[in-house]
Image: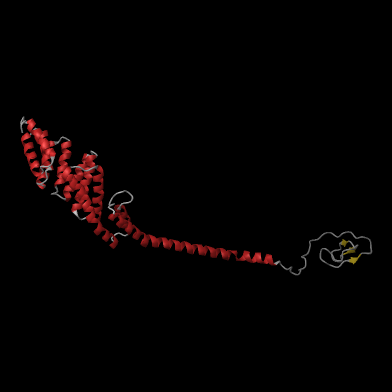
Amino acid sequence: MKGCPTCQRLFPSVYKVCLIDGTPLIEQNGPAQKEAPARAPTEPPLRASIPTPPERLARWAQNDAWPQVKSRRWLWWAALAGAAVMAALVIYVAVWPMLIERRFYAALEQGRLVTPEGNSAYELYQQLNRRKPNSPMIAQAHARTLPLVKIKGDEIFQRWYKEAKASDDDWTTAQKLYDWAAQMDPHDSHWQARRYYCRGQIAFRAQRDAEAIEAYQQAINYEPQWSLPYNSLGVLHARRRQFDTAIRWYTQAAAYDPTWSFPHSNLATAYMALQQYDNAEAALLKAIALDDARPLPHLRLSEVYEKQNRLAD
């Protein structure tokens, strides 16, 4: 057995140094000594640094550099996102209105003023006006659009003057046209009067009489000498069998447009309802004199003669 002179521990003879503190062991010739009580181990002596494998060094270097690489990646992503946002803004502010303008003029040339819904010049104009209000682009659109709107709207009114035939879709189309015209030129009473008259016609056809009366009155306020709303007020009151009121409106319509036969034939209808056949005959003769090609006044006049027992006439 060999013993450690420092810690007094015994070790087999094959050991040369103490396993605790590295002290050289010495031969013990005497009887085996009792193992000394254990004491707190001392700090092991510093050893020479062990070389680190190259791959471990590379891994450590990579781990140390990772925060820097990560921060750089985020900077790149932020720069790309900012560039994308700027490009989108440029397209929205500069390029997109130009594309809408091209589609707008294409719709004008193809006659798609307010229809079909979702692909009309009217809706494209609204998009332009939201993006470029009071711009030269909008001013040019006004100059190109107002004459077309007037022509298209007047077609519906002329059809009404000549034939008294216009569908619900016609009046809805006319209302959109004149709403658009009033938006482009809000100080022109011509557009405003026709805008409200179209509203009155739509309400009249839906039998919303109070709304129709208010709209017709607004049309008269904007254009007091326009005979059409007066005549329509007479038709509305005649439908409600308020013939005295209807006669008053028909008379005003005939006074403001002496060349229009409709108020005279309508006036005769109201006189017939009141059994005032002489007045009805005079009104019908005036209507026939103004427009001999209309068959309705001739038919009504024959009814008046029948009521007067003038069968030969």
The residue shown at (15%, 43%) is 231
Q: Which colour style is shown?
A: secondary structure
Viewer-side residue, 202 vs 311: 311
**In front: 214, or 155?**
155
| Residue 266 in sight | no
Q: Residue furthest bottom?
A: 48
Comparing 163 with 23, the one in front is 163
For image coordinates 17% across by 43% down, the residue present is 163
| Residue 34 appears left or right of 179 | right
User: In the rendered image, which quarter contains the N terminus?
Assistant: bottom right
Q: Residue furthest top?
A: 309
Q: Nearer the viewer, residue 128 or 102?
A: 102
Residue 149: tell me if it is visible: yes
Marker count (numbered): 0
Q: Quadrant of residue 43?
A: bottom right
Q: Is residue 283 above or below residue 132?
A: above
x and y, in percent, of residue 242 in the image? 14, 36
* Residue 160 x/y as whole percent: 18, 45
Q: Where is residue 190 shown, x and y percent of the image? A: 18, 52
The residue at 12%/36% (across/down) is 299
Residue 118 vertical position relative to residue 234 in the rendered view, above or below = below
Direction from residue 173 to residue 303 in the image, left or right: left
- Which quadrant is home to the C terminus? top left
Residue 171 in percent (x, y) is at 23, 45
